[in-house]
Amino acid sequence: MVDPRAFAASACGVLAAAVAILALAPQARTQAIPEQGYPERTVRIIVPTAPGGSIDTTARVIAAALAERWGKPVVIENRPGAAMIIGTEAAAKSPPDGYTLLIAHDGTMAMNPVVYPNLAYHSQRDFEPLALLTAIPEVVLVNAALPVKSIGELIAFAKANPGKLNHASGGTATLLALELFKAMAEVDITNVPFRGGAPAVTGVMSGETQVTFADLATANAGMQSGKLRTLAVTTRKRVPRLPDVPTIDEAGVPGYDVATWIGAFAPAGTPKAIRDQIEAAIKQALAASDVKAKLEALSMEIRSGASADLRAVLAGDMDKWGRLVEEKNIRIAQ
């Protein structure tokens, strides 16, 4: 015969155990993603430019490092066009599951939102910052046939020929670098958009346009071609790789200072557990000697790989470029 008190005690024990298991269930679900071993399949990185530029180069180095660490393919999908809007919008609309990422620069994420009034994405609303990857100076390049050998001569030529110089723009970053230069130097130069930084440099090499602002990684091949002349770097300090090339600041436009940063993003809503794993993997990759060597060979400065740093830099730059756009009434038709 069953003792009622023993039965009651046993039942209470079973109930308590069940309650304890249920209480732990949400935590178990939260931990399920990392325990299952993200990633379980191919990760896609969207690059919103044509192959060959600084964003593409950085993305390919990072993708190879992540694939090695994860043991899963990490593929690059180039989606150029419309000042990087096409690829970035595609990334924003992708499932927030960690299997579609975006690697983009300040032009895409900090400048497009303040320049284009009807932009279909907003970098702070539609994306989660993952990691601040690299920073890189820009250079001012002109076609070798153009009769100018310094920033001073470029300014004089532009003032003597208002609107006749054509600038090859690879996206919003190079466009706003030009617009800031135009405003500070008080010159009129016509912008001609291209489908990315590498095509823009090629356009100057061919003589289709006469001048471009381009980051060093994108400009590298053109600078070695003999078809371009390097007039200045855009940062306040000279670049160690180009010790004889002056800054725009010291060459006649005091206060001019522009550098490009590149970061990794995920669609908004991507689980924090996955974001944390990606951030940690990128930090490991950036600390690896082979990755550092590849990026530094392109005159890139390795940044922290931290999501918090990328979030702060993005907010600061949107404020900086937003003020310029407002003060100079810069508007670009989409």
Image (tube, grey):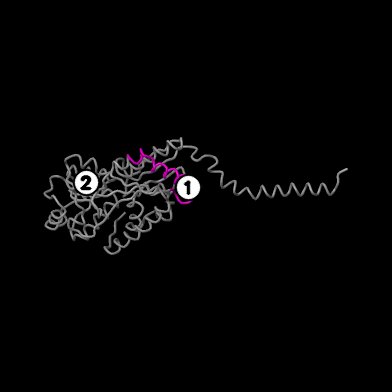
State the residue position of label 1. Answer: 276
In the image, what residue occupies the spot 16% across and 52% down? 165
Q: Nearer the viewer, mark 1 or mark 2?
A: 2
Q: Nearer the viewer, residue 312 or 170?
A: 312
Residue shown at 48% from the left, 39% from the top: 39
Asked whether 272 falls inside the magenta stretch, the response is yes
In front here: 290 or 187? 290
How far separated are the C-alphas under marks 1 and 2?
Answer: 37 Å
Label 1, secondary structure: give it: helix
- In the rendered image, the residue lying farthest to the bottom is 327
Please give the count of numbered marks on the rendered protein: 2
Q: Whole-percent x and y of residue 285? A: 40, 41
Q: Answer whether residue 197 is magenta in the image.
A: no
Instruction: Please state which of residues 297 and 56 is positioned toward the viewer in this rendering.
Output: 297
Q: Residue furthest right?
A: 1
Q: Quadrant of residue 258?
A: bottom left
Q: Is residue 44 left or right of residue 142?
A: right
Residues at discs 1 and 2 in contact (Cβ within 8 Å): no
Asked if residue 60 shows in the view, the reply is no
Disc marking residue 292: none
Q: Which residue is mark 2?
A: 242
Pick whichever of labels 1 and 2 is earlier in the sequence.
Answer: 2
Magenta-colored span? 266-293
